[in-house]
Image (cartoon, rainbow, N blue to C red):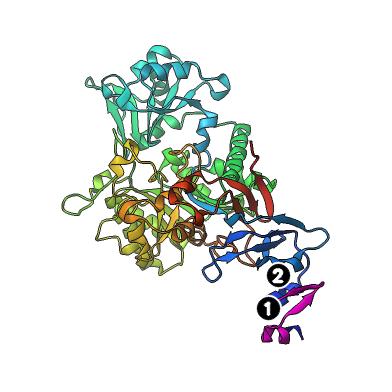
Amino acid sequence: MRKALAALGMSLFIAGVVVAPVHAEAVTQVRHQPADTVFVNGRIYTVDRARPWAEAVAIRNGTFAFVGNTVDARVYIGPSTKVVDLAGKMAMPGLHDAHQHLIKGEHRQIYCQIPPNSGIEQIIASLKACPKERQFGGWIVADVYRGDLFPGGQADRKYLDAAFPDTPVYIREWTYHHGLANSAALRIANVDRSTQDPVSGRILHRADGEPTGELLSKATWLVTRHIPALPEQTLRTALLHVAGLASQFGITSTQDAASSELHVREVSKLDKEGLWPLRTAMHVVWGNEASALMSGNQIEQYFKHRKKYETKHVFTAFAKLYIDGSPLQPHATDVELDDHGDVDTARLYEKPAVLNAAVTRFDHMGMKVKMHAVGSGAIRVALDAIEAARKANGNSGIYHDIAHSLRYSPADIDRPAALGAVAEMSPAIWQIKGPLTKNLAGAWPFRSLLKRNVLMTLGSDWVVLPTPNLFPAIGGMLDHGDESIGLSDALEIATINGAKSVGWDKVNGSIEAGKLANMIVLDRNLFDIPGAQIADTKVLTTVFEGRIVYERQEP
């Protein structure tokens, strides 16, 4: 009888309330048990193209049981149902951060800190003032320095030695790709004037042949492998703070872009305890010991046994590879195409043949690869590696990431869509106008990639930015000159595209019945304000798999 009424579009009386018209979907929902939570009277942007807006959702057992209007949602309200009146506020799916650094971003809370743009006097003062609880295993490790602000524009260990003759000191350079060690640290690492440069790394020297202490790219591993590992409790505290920050900024799923086995293990522990409110893809680094914080043999052993760390929200079928380095001065290590359109292979972190074999191998293993590729030359090499995997394995259906995706040459910009490559857009600093990004003019071609149907995702690259807040980046995509895009497209990039990229789009990334109930409530309707105001958006509530994990406390 109900099906017949629904087919005719006739009204149906439910508990004294007229619900009209009754659709087949609604009638089916009447038979369901009451929900755990019902949100009503909202402006809910679902990111479901077939049904972009709704007024209400019902959540049961961590998933959306109903998405529709407020009247129809009433049948899901039982004696124990929590009812939340959104009072017209905008809600949307939780955000996906496609390039986060769960621990590196937390270095601000763990290690000694040097104020931005410090000269050597301020650097020394900051190191001397560093609290003992931020010093581990007898080392002083700090973030960050700029070599061009040293006397003579060249970083040198001699300034550190004068203040710390016996204590090993290591400071990360502002790009996080290089570092500076004092003499005590170099002695522990057995690095001297005779030490050879490692592959894809460089030890800088003074005119007399002595090392300055500055180590570029993979050469940092010569010293950093001797830095004591962080205590388990320190990591745990840091990761719990990360979880809180993610919820505060509406992030409910993420990709950790440079994991080590230690990090995977600790996140896995937290998830088993029910303390990890993030679906997390852990990209453990292959081929770069300095970034992986593991030896080559340890890296291979991890990939062999990685599945033992998988939990409900922690996923390990992910790897990270470096093609080139940083585009920032004074030690830019990115790889652009030369004037003849060729790749300078000598500057690559890995040779093309090695990359092709690695991506083909991981693809065959059913693993997604994220490739750090900044320059147009590196992006070409990354695309070549994906093409090699497709030729060897066929189309596995795995979307491999071109991380950062700053610049595509005209000859390569049509390739990502055909190869099933993801243009992962990070760091999310394009909205910052000024000196920081002036040498990045023309980077991040949002519109050009969008019109070619390239799957784009959004990453904070939280380590470059002080927080993983993605709302300034969303607004910035609307104000990117000729490469600007619309808000609907920007929100897809920040939600469902990220889910699709990692293979979670059947359960995450949009607000649809049957999907995980990951949703955020905002303090403003993004569609009703100028794009410039999106950056100031505040998340009022974050729901992770049906649980409210964050509620903003008004001052």
* Pointer 1 residue: 21
Res 175 label: none
The quarter of the rendered structure image containing the C terminus is top right
Secondary structure beneath dot 2 equals helix
Which x, y percent locates residue 162? 38, 12
Residue type for callout 1: Pro
Residue type for callout 2: Asp
Image: magenta residue range:
4-22
Q: Nearer the viewer, residue 349 or 493?
A: 493
- Which callout, 1 or 2, points to the residue nearer the camera? 1
Mark 1 to mark 2 CA distance (whole Å): 10 Å
Which x, y percent locates residue 440? 30, 44
- Identify the residue at horizontal 50%, vertical 62% (top origin): 500
Q: Is residue 57 left or right of residue 126?
A: right
Vertical relation: 494 (above or below) 290: below
**Could you tell me how many numbered marks the image carries?**
2
Secondary structure beneath dot 1 equals loop
Vertical relation: 139 (above or below) 36: above
- Residue 361: quarter of image: bottom left
Q: Which numbered disc flags the more N-terminal residue, 1 or 2?
A: 1
- Identify the residue at horizontal 20%, vertical 53% (top origin): 342
Is residue 313 one of those drawn in magenta? no
Q: Nearer the viewer, residue 278 or 33?
A: 33
Q: Nearer the viewer, residue 11 or 489?
A: 11
* Pointer 2 residue: 72
- Residue 51: quarter of image: bottom right
